[in-house]
Amino acid sequence: MTKVNNWLKNTQAWLWPQSCHLCGDGPLGLDKALCSACLRDLPWNTHCCSVCALPLVHDAICGQCLRKPPPYHRALASFSYRDPVSHIVHGLKFGRRLYYGRFLGEALAETVAQAEHLVMPNLLIPMPLHRKRMNERGYNQAYEIARPVARLLGCSIAKGVVVRTGETKEQSQLNALQRRHNLKNAFTVTGPIKGLHIVIIDDVMTTGATVGELARALIYKGARRIDVWLAARAALGR
Ligand SMILES: [Zn+2]
Ligand SMILES: [Zn+2]
């Protein structure tokens, strides 16, 4: 029985940490990853570009979006991609900390619910992983973020609508030019999406090259409108 109890306790702690993951304060509720003080101090993306969610000092449209608007309608992001959010995203992506997916997804649902002029989409598409990386990792972090968003906002998550085909290298290891080249024919849209308003969900957007490529592929196949919902938005040049 003790063995079973220990196993349960370990599993529970793995699924839902019982003390704050940043400061160690606790105990917290079973479904909480951070204490309220750490939550408040996170780099919330309060002032940003109203098109691409790039963190700015004041709300505005950034120079990049003015020069060349992206292929999507609007991006929303909960956080600026800085510490400790970068640490949380890293833990979800590379450390199998799936409860961070739930945390980031719930924060994202809150951000979306508070956004002005919100138009709810027909479908959420978590940024697909290449099959090779999916096999290595065993889960898709964008899907882990999308799940709580879908649950809290009452949206559907697309299944098998897009496949990641061409690109194989990790984008974060490449410069802007290499990223564009790496993304050539990166996505194959296989599902019927004509006339749909689609939201792409991703963990972090940096240059926007990957999201832009997927948005273009979806529009090419007849999607009516694309929005982008992100856990975090990085400043350019990262
Ligand atoms: Zn804390
Ligand atoms: Zn912008």
Image (tube, rainbow, N blue to C red):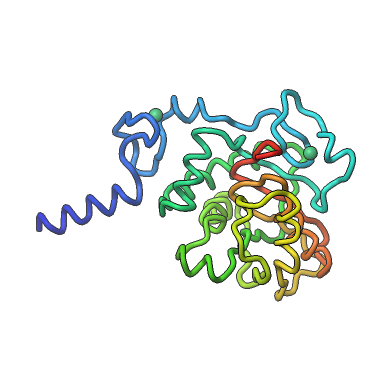
Residue at the spot 88% in from the left edge and 45% down from the top edge = 68
Residue 149 vs residue 58: left or right?
A: left
Looking at the picture, how far across and down is residue 177, in whole percent?
A: 76, 52
Q: How many numbered dots are placed on residues in this image? A: 0
Does residue 198 sit above or below 103 in this rendering?
below
Instruction: State the residue in front, 166 or 158.
Output: 166
Residue 135 vs residue 199: left or right?
A: left
Q: Quadrant of residue 116?
A: top right
Residue at the spot 69% in from the left edge and 39% down from the top edge = 237
Q: Quadrant where the N terminus lies?
A: bottom left
Residue at the spot 32% in from the left edge and 50% down from the top edge = 14
Looking at the picture, how far across and down is residue 18, in whole percent?
A: 31, 40
Q: Quadrant of ligand 2?
A: top right
Residue 197 vs residue 110: left or right?
A: right
Q: Residue furthest left?
A: 1
Residue at the spot 40% in from the left edge and 40% down from the top edge = 33
Q: Residue furthest right?
A: 67
Does residue 13 sit above or below 157 in this rendering?
above
Q: Quadrant where the C terminus lies?
A: top right
Looking at the picture, how far across and down is residue 208, in whole percent?
A: 72, 49
Q: Quadrant of residue 168?
A: bottom right
Instruction: State the residue in front, 86 or 99.
Output: 86
Looking at the picture, how far across and down is residue 28, in whole percent?
A: 33, 35
